[in-house]
């Protein structure tokens, strides 16, 4: 009879251990499920932020491209019609440059006369 009680106690202990183990497994699984769901929510938030920032980046890039095109067009207009606002040469310098361009070996003397001569 003692063996019967010992066997019953051993079976009860094994069943209790097994059910406790199973309950802990459920708790761990529930915690893992919550962690995975939280990570999925965070990942979704990151994707939404990435999409929003990429949209803002595309808008800014389009604006920058438009500005870049405007500057390019403006530079082309400046190159097509050069405008000299300041002259840095006097008439003698201009005469010497024109003589060099035309290939004249002796540019001659200046046409300007000094006052009082």
Image: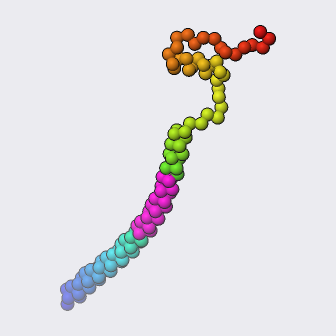
Q: What stretch is highlighted in magenta?
A: 43-66
Within the image, what quadrant is residue 40 found in?
A: bottom left
* Residue 111 picture quarter: top right
Tell how many labels: 0
Confirm whether residue 102 shows in the render. Answer: yes
Percent coordinates x, y for residue 96 in the rendering: 59, 17
16 or 51, nearer to the observer? 51
The residue depicted at 51 percent of the width and 56 percent of the height is 63
Residue 13 visible in the picture? no
Q: Position of residue 86 (x, y in %)?
A: 65, 31
Q: Is residue 113 left or right of residue 5?
A: right
Question: Percent x, y for residue 22?
Answer: 29, 79
Q: Residue at x 33, y 78 (%)?
A: 26
Q: Give x and y (percent) for residue 61.
A: 48, 55
User: Measured along the vertical axis of the image, is residue 4 above or below residue 63?
Assistant: below
Relative side of 100 to 4, left or right: right
Residue at (52% x, 14% y) in the render: 104
Q: Does the magenta stretch include residue 61?
A: yes
Residue at the spot 59% in from the left edge and 36% down from the top edge: 83
Q: Main secondary structure of the magenta part?
A: helix
Its colouring scheme is rainbow
49 vs 10, left or right, is right
């Amino acid at each position: 009879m003692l063996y019967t009680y010992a066997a019953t106690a051993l079976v009860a202990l094994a069943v209790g251990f097994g059910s406790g183990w199973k309950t802990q497994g459920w708790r761990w699984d529930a915690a893992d499920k919550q962690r995975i769901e939280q990570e999925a929510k965070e990942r979704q938030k990151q994707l939404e932020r990435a999409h929003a920032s990429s949209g803002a980046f595309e808008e800014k890039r389009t604006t920058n491209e438009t500005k870049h095109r405007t500057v390019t067009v403006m530079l082309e207009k400046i190159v097509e019609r050069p405008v000299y606002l300041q002259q840095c040469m006097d008439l003698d310098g201009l005469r010497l440059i024109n003589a060099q361009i035309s290939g004249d070996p002796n540019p001659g003397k200046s046409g300007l006369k000094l006052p009082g001569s």
